[in-house]
Image (cartoon, grey):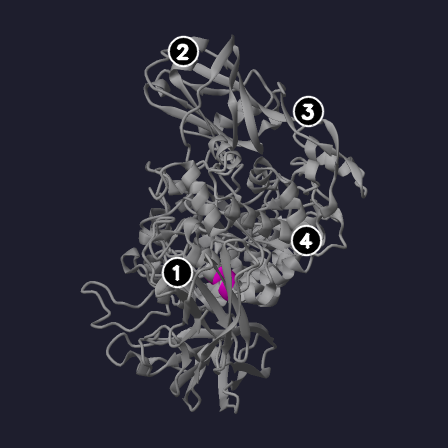
Amino acid sequence: MKISLAQEIKEKSNYKAGFVILFLFLFVLSGTISAQSFTAATASTNQPEAGKAFDANKKTGWELSNEDLTKDQYIMFVLASPGDVKEVHLQADGFSAENLKKMMDLYITYDPMNLGEPLDFDIKGKGNFVLSFAPKYGAHLRLQFKRGIATSTVSLNEVGVSYAEAETKAVEGDRPWMDADLPVKARVDLLLAAMTPADKMELLREGWGIPGIPHLGIPFLNKVEAIHGYSYGSGATIFPQAIGLGASWDKKLAEEVAGVIGDETKAAHTLQAWSPVLDVAQDARWGRCEETYGEDPVLVSQIGGAWIKGYQSKGLLVTPKHFAAHGAPLGGRDSHDIGLSEREMREIHLVPFRHVFRTYNCQSVMESYSDYLGVPVAKSKELLHRILREEWGFEGYIVSDCGAIGNMTSRKHYVAKDEVEAANLALAAGIATNCGDIYNNKSVIEAAQNGELDMEALDAVCSSMLETIFRNGLFEDNPSKPLDWNTIYPGWNSPEHKEMAHLAALKSIVLLENKNEILPFSNDLKSIAVIGPGADDLQPGDYTAKLQEGQLKSVLTGLKQRAGDNIEINFAKGCEFISDKEEDFNEALEAAKSSDIAVLVLGDCSTSESTQGIKKTSGEANDYASLILPGNQQKLLEAVCETGKPVILVLQVGRPYNLSYAKEHCAAILVNWLPGQEGGPATADVLFGDYNPAGRLPMTFPRDVAQLPLYYNFKTSGRGYNYVDMPFYPLYSFGYGLSYTNFNYSNLKVNENADGTVDIAATVTNVGERDGEEVVQLYVTDMYASVKTRVMELKDFDRIQLAAGESREIQFKLTPYQLSLLDENMDRVVESGQFKILLGGKSPEYVAADRIKDSVGFETSADGVSTMLNYTHSFKADFDLSFAQIDQATVEGKTLVNINVKNDGTITDVGKVKIFVDGVQQEEIHHYELTPGEEKIIQFKLEGRNMKNLVAVAKYKSIAQTL
């Protein structure tokens, strides 16, 4: 049987009102071994050979030599389709069944970082082995070999799996929830009443999306990772990684790119993207910086929001992630909590999520591996319910990051003693889809059937998912079909989509240095040395689909195409991306010496997960400590610079690096990030002057890793700023980037309106001789406040095109909310007083010393202009409480207390209300966020009926009611 059987059954079924044919699933064995069992493999040794273990060729394989067998070794496979694996088939040489059983541990896991316990398996066969075990759900197979047992060379020639799959049995039944004319809530209630506990757990497991339950008519909903292109299968357009899109500072571009990705998603019959990443990246060591839009919450909000707008415009669903506090890990180590306060969370890390949920009505969200106020997010009711749902009005369903629920056990956090307790904690927090191995764990399913799970919480999370599916009409019109991983779908990588990828790559390029205007290349250039591991090996970033041959166009390819026959191109790789061995630079040095100019393409190794035989330096689970160019690349850079030839450094990276040496010794530096499939030609266009670069840094580039964390919007120091051996200032600031033309700012006008909004306008002029783009950035410094505020904060931005000599007035409007702060009581207020308004093409400069805010500004009008606003308004919320209704009869054994909350103040703010019954505070606490004039009914469900006195308490007010 094929893995897609259940979906085919659903599609072929003719559902009608009344009695219909239903399908019940029974486990059967599929003994077929196929090269399609896996999409990729990684190994502890002989990595280039790992793919031969599933290449459908029995004569090739992954081999372990006598020397290899003196150490523990492993090989891990990515399953083409997650599911309940029942058997592993091995065609192997050099093993006996007895030795194999003794030396090998077998793991089926969803999360490759969290293996769980090895499976107990039976083994049969000789040469062709069948390993059988109780079905285990997972997305990865790991075979781990213990040292010292086998004494001669062994080889795994072919590996495959078989699944516990489905066959059908016809029964009859009524399904009133299929009536699309019924209200959504009525349909959900009817369906929940028909579902068994096992059905509910099946709904919540993850299998490349929502697996669906055909015998109940619940549709299968396909998903993809899509941060810079459709990332499953092979052949979709590959756009610049998210950090590059952030560097474009172009909202319209982000929307258009996401629209193209959406078109290619629809072509593959997929409904949902587990994207975008809205983490605010505050530590360059973190491997996942490349997946983010940068270090500022407004930049992340605007670019991420534009991406969501574009993708959702195609009728698709998004899943913003990782909610929340994922972008500031301790030491840059992924998911190592730094202990962020509520203030820091609300000022920085919650901002992008609040923006997109209140603006774009997103239907799902992925929670993070992180903590919130010391509590793993996977069990945080405060974050996942009170803030997400009650404050922001989120009505969709929550997806766990892969393994996050299981991490609450002794695997990571030790807040749950076993899988059942972890499941109960996650259900109580409201997590629906479990990417991982808890909700599909046999003991958890048995606990659901035995009533050991919180059934009320289970129903609530199932309801959140079913409401989303019903609300979006997916029971009636479901576009999802199982992905054919070997099909290039119509429209994928079309000429128009390639053009969009090229444009996105162009707009993401940031020019950091251009000494003596060495760029663009002069017309009399005769020869170029193209050097570096990235020169002919373009890196697209993680979450990239399997690459088509020739799909990635390298910088070398782009330069050769652009240079034609008139310029000699001398290529030398120079070194590997990362190596702990000495490498010979002679060929690279000779290429540089024999050329007019040297282009060095250095940086990260970060590419498709299907690419074998590499060690990555960036991307998920690839944090990097030193920020010195990896391997021997820094040495190569210095050696080429010492030849005396002008060096153009092209930095192909997913994060900031230490460019202190390069800044001093290179003639020019540009960052093309992880630029997508058209990155090479785009880079050549910039080098030759066919395109005028205008990208800006989305993250600060430090002088040294010792400065981290280092970001532009810091708060004032209680002492000094500089180190004894190093200045405080970064090497390149957030928002910085050069152009081949020059701009000037003038005529700054600021006007405070009667409603407290502020109109800002300035004239921007292209004073150079080339057409170009400018990224106009609006910053505000709150000079004096009741609490410490940041030295400067980005409030808005716009990327504009100006012809040579052209002037344009650029306008922005600030709202009172954008001028607000959280005061010492954590109330959102706007305080009257002085605000410095700064408008320019980069973040403002400052003197890192006492009176630092006074120094914030621009050195010349070429950089920007500023003025002081004496703001006269003040704003504050004022929440009023009243009892709306008290009902002691509707719900058996409970009293329903409805409290009306209204914001009689002048600004949007959040609040909390709790209730006391006969002097005892109840556990139930509710949050709210209300705009001025808005009101909301908050319902408490209190145990018991024999109560006399109720007191509802908010931060500043309380009300009492005697029953």
* Dot in front, 2 or 3: 3
Q: Earlier in the sequence, mark 4 or mark 1?
A: 4
Dot 4 lies on which element?
helix
**Kind of residue at badge 4:** Ala
Q: Is 121 on the left or on the right of 179, as rendered? A: left
Q: Residues within 10 Å of mark 2 (few under 14, many from 20)?
A: few
Distance, label 3 to label 1, CA atoms, is 54 Å
Q: State the residue position of label 2.
A: 99
* Residue closest to the eye, 517 or 298: 298
Q: Earlier in the sequence, mark 2 or mark 3?
A: 3
- CB atoms of marks 2 and 1 within 8 Å: no
The numbered disc on residue 438 is none
Q: How many marks?
A: 4
- The range drawn in magenta is 387-391
Q: State the residue position of label 1.
A: 922
Q: Main secondary structure of the magenta part?
A: helix
Where is 934 relative to 107, above or below?
A: below
